[in-house]
């Protein structure tokens, strides 16, 4: 007659279950830390980009107000430059109501499928004294921000 020790088999099962649960918990911990790190990196990247996007919007508007149509044209994105020739852009820039002052109020940056995009909101003061609020979409092209769409 064989004797079975009470609790002999049952003692192994909780240890195995504990081991599996420990491995699962460690895996979840690594995933959570990785997700938090990726989120922090993305937040920092977008936050740093907003300053550069603001600088690019202000440089574009400075070129516009000073009458440097060539400089302003060079700050446009490829899509906008394909729609407007340099001559058309310069002609449009010289037609009233020209912009005499500007103030960039806000810049928001977002990542869209790995492509950084921004929207700069600016108050434009026309020669006539009319103040116009304008949103300028921007895209990051390499290491530079460029204005897209109709900047007028």
Image (cartoon, rainbow, N blue to C red):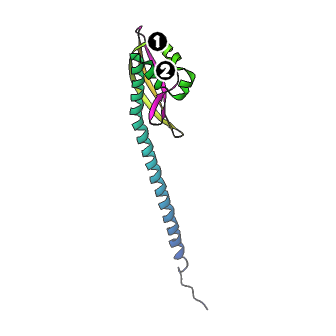
Res. 52 image quadrant: top left
Residue 81 sits above or below residue 88 on the image:
below
Residue 87 sits above or below residue 16 on the image:
above
Give the structural element (helix, strand or loop) at label 1.
Answer: helix
Give the residue drawn at x 46%, y 12%: 94
Find out whether residue 59 is within the magenta segment: no
Which residue lies under the disc numbered 2?
151
Q: Give the class, few, some or many, for how many residues have Cα within 10 Å of label 2's Cα (few <14, many ≥20).
A: some
Horizontal and vertical percent position of residue 86: 51, 20
In this image, 53 relative to 9: left or right? Answer: left
Which of the pair 43/115 is nearer the observer?
Answer: 115
Horizontal and vertical percent position of residue 35: 47, 50
| Foreground disc of the pair 1, 2 | 1
Identify the residue at the far top of this view: 128
Identify the residue at the far right of this view: 1
Q: Which contiguous range is marked in magenta?
A: 127-152
Which residue lies under the disc numbered 1?
94
Q: Earlier in the sequence, mark 1 or mark 2?
A: 1
Which of the pair 28/148 is nearer the observer?
Answer: 148
Quadrant of image for the N terminus: bottom right
Horizontal and vertical percent position of residue 114: 52, 40
Horizontal and vertical percent position of residue 125: 40, 14
Which of the pair 65/37 is nearer the observer?
Answer: 65
Give the residue drawn at x 42%, y 10%: 130
Which of the pair 81/9 is nearer the observer?
Answer: 81
Give the structural element (helix, strand or loop) at label 2.
Answer: loop
What is the distance, in whole Å, between disc 1 and disc 2 at their CAs? Answer: 14 Å
Find out whether residue 143 is within the magenta segment: yes
Res. 47 image quadrant: top left
Q: CB of mark 1 within 8 Å of CB of mark 2?
A: no
Give the residue drawn at x 50%, y 13%: 91
């Amino acid at each position: 007659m064989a004797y079975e020790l009470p609790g002999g088999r049952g003692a192994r099962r909780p240890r195995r279950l504990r081991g599996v649960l420990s491995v699962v918990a460690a895996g979840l911990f690594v995933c959570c830390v990785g997700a938090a790190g990726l989120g922090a990196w993305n937040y920092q990247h977008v936050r740093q980009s907003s300053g550069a996007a603001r600088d690019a919007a202000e440089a574009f508007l400075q070129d516009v107000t000073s009458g440097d149509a060539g400089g302003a044209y060079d700050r446009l994105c490829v899509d906008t430059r394909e729609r407007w020739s340099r001559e058309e852009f310069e002609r449009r820039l010289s037609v009233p109501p020209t912009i005499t002052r500007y103030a960039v109020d806000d810049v928001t940056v977002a990542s869209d499928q790995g492509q950084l995009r921004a929207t700069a909101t600016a108050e434009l003061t026309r020669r006539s004294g009319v103040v116009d609020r304008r949103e300028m979409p921007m895209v990051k092209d390499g290491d530079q921000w460029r204005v897209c769409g109709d900047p007028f």
